Image: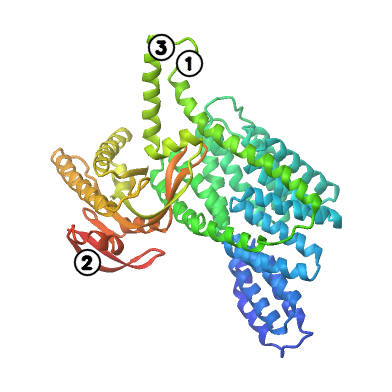
Amino acid sequence: MFQGVVSAQKQGQSLIDSLLVELPLAKEDTNKVKLLNDLSYSYPYLNPDEGLRYGRAGLELAEKLSWIYGIAAAYYGIGANYANKADYANALENEYKSLKLYEQLHDRSKQAGLLRNIGIVLHTSKNQIKALEYDLKALEIFQELNRREDIAIIYGNMANVYYTLKDKEKVLENNLKSLQIYKEINNREGIARSLGNIANFYAEEGDFSKAMVYYFDALRKETELGNKNGVTRNLGNIGETFLDIANDSTGEIKPDSLIPAGKTANLNKALEYLKNAISNAKELKQTEYILAFAELLSEAYRMSGNTKDALTTYKDFIIIRDSIYDIDKYNAAARKEMNYEYGKREDSITYRKQLTEITLTEEKKSRSIEKRFYIGGLVLVLVFSGFMYNRWHITKKQKKIIEIEKKRSEELLLNILPEEVAEELKAKGTADAKHFDKVTVMFTDFKGFTQITEKLSPSELVNEIHTCFKAFDNIITKYNIEKIKTIGDAYMCAGGLPVTNTTNAIDVVNAAIDIQHYMSQHSKLRKEQNKEIFEIRIGIHTGPVVAGIVGVKKFAYDIWGDTVNIASRMESTGEAGKVNISGTTYEMVKDKIKCSHRGKIQAKNKGEIDMYFVI
């Protein structure tokens, strides 16, 4: 689609080589460094890997020349490219190096640009209060320099932070400030970006008709400008909005020229726009956009009845998500931020005053909103039970009703979350994510599931999966294993959380053996009845994970980490009718359970891994 980008990538290395070797190095040979750094900084939205190559070449040359300004500029570009790869720790490391050098050079303009970029990285890596801190620093300098365009950018960035902090008024206020400045200076790129941000606001508010007007206006302007990044962003957001419309159960959305009538029509539109957005994002190597839209595409496939593509897309999403939202990455990013800030004297009195006010207000508001949501979820259970009472006038009969409904609410909550997490949620209003050093993860799926689905009616298919998964639930309960989720025909569970233990590897492998035995007996029975049979693959791996509650709608307990990805690979590289475990798990169960060594097997994106079949 974007031929110019591909062509530039092919020429990139030869250009770097010629710039480095064409002439003997000399003090005055700074134009080469400038060109390399300019190329590096222009590449984050085109191809961050290419941008890093240019940046590193510029840094190498600048260091040979001992040119501090060139070194600072190289770190600037390298940081921007890492940010677009969602590598937050490396982004912050290079941006802080650049900022320190520009502080030494007393370059206020470059300092402001870096403060702005650091704010974006902190916002993306979920450190909102710190993001606001850096936005305010940048805003102060840009106002001092009367840099109108940059002031507009900062207002847009602050709107994004306030969105995450759930402050609707400030979201719209800052976006409108940004749009107004862009219009005053006739900045077409900024106008297009602001229109998309305002569209996001209305979409979140549920005003889909108004959102679509802004989205399509933004998409048209980004297309005219040839801004591939902006086009991709709006395609994805439009796809998400069509999905929201298809999900809407109020029936109040009136079809118009932009919104078709009927759930199916809107689902088809969602699929069309989301697929186009992901295709563009892959061309641009925009990891964050692929991540954002892949989960939505999986949901659209699921709603449209395409379980095969829903599962494939969701597995891809999990792999990308875990590569980005890794607790080690967040900790590394936090360490980079703390290393820079430690002992640093803050000079701006105005900034400190503004920050103190915002920090207190936003932290309080953020805690309030978060607690209101989770507590609201618990209250909703009671409302659905049709139960309301006056706590000062309770009869004996009413008290009995209260106890019954409370028990039902507890059972419903425990059906969604582990008991320990549910108790923490009720006590605090939130549940913290936690790191576990040793958890054993099991994945199962059915061989040839897609072909089987074509031979069964929808009701038969659902009944058969329900029968199997119900049996799996009973088995893992016996071994004190936590069910995580099901996706189509895939079943995922884990031992060793939310309460740690030393037996989780043996527990999970024994459960897998029981599941395999059940499926063997179940398939034998179906075969005797002349029905389609399900053959199961099971994969297991042991390692560290992070676990916690995710989402704000239909929230669920989930786990992250490379352990999850490897367990999935154990399943996909296994064989039907067998339990495939990693070498790590084998070392923990070899004294209790017999296994046969398969050797080192190639696993997608993981290289060769020692694998064993349980005998």
Q: Quadrant of residue 467?
A: top left
Name the residue rendered at 21%, 49% in the picture: 516
Tell me the CA gap for discs 1 and 3. 10 Å
| Residue that label 3 marks | 398
Q: Earlier in the sequence, mark 2 or mark 1?
A: 1
| Residue that label 2 marks | 597
Position of residue 193 in the picture relative to residue 451 (left or right): right
| Residue that label 1 marks | 388
Q: Is residue 11 above or below residue 218?
A: below
Tell me the CA gap for discs 2 and 3. 63 Å
Residue kind at label 2, given as amino acid type:
His
Q: Earlier in the sequence, mark 1 or mark 3?
A: 1
Q: Earlier in the sequence, mark 2 or mark 3?
A: 3
- Under circle 1, the secondary element is loop
Q: Quadrant of residue 98?
A: bottom right
Name the residue rendered at 65%, 72% in the picture: 55
Residue found at the far front of this picture: 343
- Under circle 3, the secondary element is helix
